[in-house]
Image (cartoon, rainbow, N blue to C red):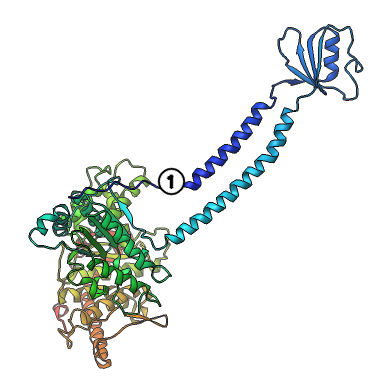
Amino acid sequence: MAKRPPMPPKKTNNFLRLSLFWVLLVLGVLATIAILSPHENLTTVPLSSVIERANNGEIAKIEVQGNELKVTPEGSEEATEKSTKDASSSLQEQGLNPDADVELTISEPSATGDVLWNLAIIIIPVVLIAAFFLFMMRQAQGQNNQALGFGKSKAKLYGEDKTKVLFEDIAGNEAAKQDLEEVVDFLKHPKKYENLGAKIPKGVLLVGNPGTGKTMLARAVAGEANVPFFSISGSEFVEMFVGVGASRVRDLFAKAKKNSPAIIFIDEIDAVGRRRGSGMGGGHDEREQTLNQILVEMDGFETGTTVIVLAATNRADVLDPALLRPGRFDRRTNITLPERKDREAILKVHFKKKPVDDTVNLDKLAAKTAGSSGADLANIANEAAIVAARRNSKKISNKDLTEAFEKVAIGPERKSKVMNQKDKELTAYHEAGHALVGHVLPDSDPVHKVTIIPRGGTGGVTWFLPPEDTIYTSVYEFKDILARALGGRIAEKIVNGEDGITTGAGSDLRKATEIARDMVIEQGMGAKLRDQVFHEDNGGMVFDRMTHERPYSDDTAKEIDAEVAALIKEAARRAEIVLKANMPSLKKLADALLEEETIEEDGVVELLKDATLPKEAKLYS
């Protein structure tokens, strides 16, 4: 492997150094004046007292400097007192006996202090003004340097002075690690592949949901290979001036070639790598020029130059096809959401340095957090520590962990929000309706918790958690999800009548409609439009408005609307059948919620043990 070049010296802050120099200079001048100026600590006494004591022989010496007197009492070796006489007369004229036994010395007053203070009054303002002008000149010079360096890359170089991240430091994502280990081997042993005529891959695209650890894995590749790691965000290329982004790309790749073997990591590459001609990204072609330069640089590596580009995005679908063709980003590594065993491993990493007691069960928490990313789990661990610290505990308990998980997943409890009795009853029946329908239907997830304490923006929460991680969702499961989502609205209608429904079901209805549309448009699960997918793109901006291109006709749109309406009506019918057949269980659960406010999974199962599934509720249209 080629020898790594020495790390560049760190830049010092010239402004701080200059400011410190002038401050020390001024302080030095003031200190010199203070040292040279007389500063004896003498007691001031009245002139009449001095003359009276001198006449009585109690004073050994009087030094006269102008109008100032320094008095040395009898028995003292130096002056301890001072006084002031009248400038128009002598001490004898003011009462001192010419025959008094006192040593009298008269000298001209010293002008040193006055001269120094006069010099200070002149010099210090001049020094400060000179410092100000010098500072302004250096600032102007810095602006010129900044203008000259406008096209320079802002990439940060991570080298040996940073703490290395290795694969063993990252829990989970084993499949992604295996894919990236090949990249590490390319960087460590490039000759092994070149001798066989193999070309070093030029680009690896890391694709995954936010928080899954794409940046951390890129850092681990650099750490394992022990090579320089240039990190930059896609948005840092683009400026308001055309050509700056392309210039920064050229500069970045030039730096990486000098430090070869090296890694360039471009985070959020979709900021500059969007499909060209989409109309997104601004009114000028600066972004497209930047993208073109990236494409050229990735194709223009000299022979023997070992530079690999890692790029991360969670929107691979919007990237330009030229970026994804072979020869540019040769490999695509999918960073998936962690599975249960990976979630447990990630939680152990985040709780490694946190004190926990014996009640903490990370395996149980891992089972609950299906669909959570690594960042979500880190947030839960941090919230648990905050909760424990708030109650002045020295260790994190399982109760703290549960509270933190629920706060992150469904929002914090808002116990301060006061509800009247009518609203509490309405909320209790609403949440009991969700829980009862979800409990009875065979393909629904089990109820985890029901509460009528407001959380986040809701008046209450019925929380369903899957018993295990699943990859696929069937039509039956989707339909049971729709039915339990409508259970709250149907419970309101049964208890309060057709006109007794409220706005409490607004979020439930929006969610149900989104699921129904996804079933028809994206999953091909409609009754009449079965096995047909009508994917809508994300649209573009036209006259400051977002537009969507529909890949189907108006007649098909009507069919889709009819399919969605049919799914919602079917879900409402099934929920109503279940609730009407189990009214005693509905009332029992609602009464328990009014009394206890929150009921856990075991309590819900006990309260709903007599609830049954009517035969007609199994029928699907």
- Position of 199 relative to 505 (above/below): above
Residue for point 41% across, 64% down = 419
Instruction: Report the amino acid beneath label 1.
Output: Thr
Specify whether 108 is left or right of 165: right
Where residue 323 sits: x, y (%)? 24, 71
Q: Quadrant of residue 392?
A: top left
Where residue 399 sits: x, y (%)? 28, 50
Please identify the residue farthest to the right as the structure is shown. 93
The residue tagged 1 is 12
Q: Quadrant of residue 372?
A: bottom left
Q: Quadrant of residue 427?
A: bottom left
Please identify the residue farthest to the left as the structure is shown. 196
Q: Is residue 326 visible?
A: yes
Where residue 234 sits: x, y (%)? 33, 65
In this view of the protein, which residue sits in the foreground, 18 or 488?
18
Please identify the residue farthest to the front as the structure is shown. 303
**What secondary structure is marked by label 1?**
loop
Where residue 538 sits: x, y (%)? 30, 78
Residue count near mark 1 (Cα–Cα under 10 Å), binned few <14, some 14–19, many ≥20: few
Residue for point 70% across, 32% down = 116
In this view of the protein, which residue sits in the foreground, 114 or 38?
114
Q: Is residue 361 visible?
A: no
In this view of the protein, which residue sits in the foreground, 187 or 69?
187
- Position of 548 relative to 396 (above/below): below
The image quadrant where one finds the C terminus is bottom left
Q: How many marks?
A: 1
- Position of 370 relative to 33 (above/below): below
Residue for point 52% across, 52% down = 138
